[in-house]
Image: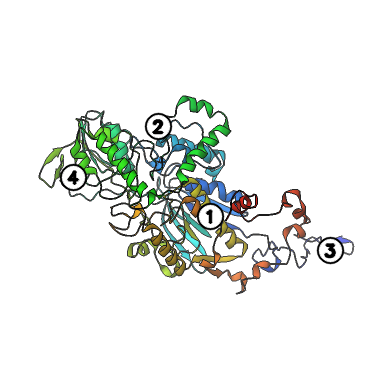
Amino acid sequence: MWAPSKAVNGEKKSEEKSLAPYEFDKNEPGNLARRCIDQPRRMKVICIGAGMSGIITGIFFPRQIANLDLVIYDKNPELGGTWYESRYPGVACDVPSHAYQFTFESNPHWSRYWAGGAEILDYLRHVATKYGADKYMKFNIRVTKAEWNEEGGKWHVALERTDTGETFTDTSDVLLSATGALNKWKMPDIPGLDSFKGPVMHSATWDPNFDVTGKRIALIGGGASGIQILPQIAPKAKYVDHYMKGKTWIPPFGIGALGVLNRSGDPVTPQDELDAWKDPANYLNYRKEIERSLHGASDVLYKGTDNALAFQKMCEDHMRSKLAKKPEIFEALKPDFAPACRRLTPGPGYLEALVRDDVNFISTTIKEVTPTAIVTKDGKVREVDAIVCATGFAGYQQHFPLIGKNGINLQQQWEDDIPESYVGLAPENMPNYYCFLGPNGGPGVGSAVPFLEFGARYMIKCVQKLQREWLKSMTPKRSAIKKFGEYTDKYLEPTVFNSSCRAWWRHHLNGRILALWPGSALHGMYLWSNPRWEDYEYELKDEQHGNPFSWLGNGYCVSQVEGKDTTAYLDDENLKVPVVNPLEAKYLEGQVSF
């Protein structure tokens, strides 16, 4: 704020402007002695990925962080992340559509209980445009390296335009990863696969122009994508050889990812429900009903309990009945581990497809691929026209060099040791770096989208702390990461997730569970709402001259210096007696007791 010019001999000399001791000096924005305590410094945030988490970032961050520069880079030509990339036949969400949407934008128009990929992508486009997240997004740009600059306290991010090959660098105070764990797809390691003369594709890179009609197809893999693809291609292909060496549980219709009974019957939404949802209140109640079922506490999650055994029996009876025509497939598929040790997929139509006469279920290990056929270890040769690999993703492998403190590369850190993070969001040695759905950062119980939103709110609190207190960096302490890991292992040990099975979210067959949060989604959302700042190590910016209280500034607030309202604390909305949290409010109202 500039003071009026002084008059000299009756004339004003505009060049001789003076500052009161408490006024902000525009020529020295880093002069903390002239800053109000609530005058935040400018912050630059780079977010990698424009999927669901990137969209949340583009909506939440600009609305809650003052003085923010935000850019969201994505390697694809448009937003959507996995829902843009995944175009294989039958791609769909394995979470009920009505619970797989943003809290602030309910969609009563889902056509199916488990919406297809194209429908989800349309919803994401709509939300990003409506709330302005798209204006922060830049497409066809891939991150090739990111390195923390200790002296300047900035991330230097190397970028490449995927359409032109042009390279450039951007810098930021904070770096976010919104790429998810299932972003880098992985082809199977099969000798001779690259010699095959016909089309070879991964489910994550499906060619939309490829027509399976009348062709002999080899489908390798029986994870979520393989389970969804088979029912779609089997009726059109001449025949399908389905190679499935693993074992899996297929739950009945109406069973969610953790055996919580959601809804029975056909997954297509009945017309009477669509009519009822014209009233937003009716739809919200329906959505709450579904999300309550996902959030429910149940001992079905714990090994050996009556409910866990009953759910396993339910899955077994369902599979045995559906595969009665080919009982040998049931015996080959039946796992010796509990349901939910591997992620459960509802799989409508999969078991029915397995018993078709034109589908060959092959559990024998593949030995090699020739230019025209697949050879199994028993010596059988099966000629095919095309090979589809539904073989999953690389999981928690860092996709590009990410160099943090002391030159430590997160790629090497997570390769040499078990991938870990602080409360699912922040890896060791990486200042001002946060990742959505990091190690042990995904909910096993509850609705995932609110979980993502609360993760973003936690990151916002971190950015605001850096901004408010003029910090160069904050990095989670190694001791806090290790203690969180110990708690996580102890929590997950008795659960069905910890049965003996091979799953992308495990370090190895009986190794540490990497993906799941140690508790429910609501449990994690509560923790993220109350950050433990003592679990971080902090570095000051040079402007603080070694005094962490320098950010207190000139002793005033902006409202005082700029002559704005200084009695807002007396406004009606601020006169209510505060409560600590919603649970305490209910306690005070007598709704709950401790």
Q: Which residue is disc 4 drawn over?
A: 195
Report whether residue 464 is seen.
yes
Give the mark, 3 or 1, whose residue is nearer the N terminus. 3
Q: Which label belongs to residue 6?
A: 3
* In front of the other: 331 or 173: 331
For residue 526, which numbered disc appears in the image? 1
Toward the left, the furthest residue is 379
| C-alpha distance separating marks 2 and 3 | 77 Å
Q: Secondary structure at mark 1?
A: helix
Q: If you read the primary sequence from the N terminus, does the residue marked by circle 2 or circle 3 appear first? A: 3
Q: Decide: is 298 above or below 415.
A: above
In the rendered image, residue 403, in percent from the top left (x then y), is placed at 42, 64
- Kindly report which numbered mark, 2 or 3, lies closer to the viewer in this rendering: 2
Q: Quadrant of the N terminus?
A: bottom right
Residue at 50% across / 45% down in the picture?
55
Element type at mark 4? helix
Instruction: Find numbered disc 2 in the image and state the secondary structure of the residue it sits on.
Output: loop
- Are there few (<14), some (14-19), or many (20+) residues within 10 Å of tag 1? few
Q: Residue at x 27, y 32 (%)?
A: 352
Q: Which residue is mark 2?
A: 267
Eye-nearest disc, 4 or 3 = 4
Q: Nearer the viewer, mark 3 or mark 1?
A: 1
Estimate how packed mark 2 is, as few (under 14), some (14 to 19) or many (20 or more) residues with alpha carbons within 10 Å.
some
Between the residue at mark 3 and the residue at mark 1, the CA separation in whole angstroms equals 56 Å
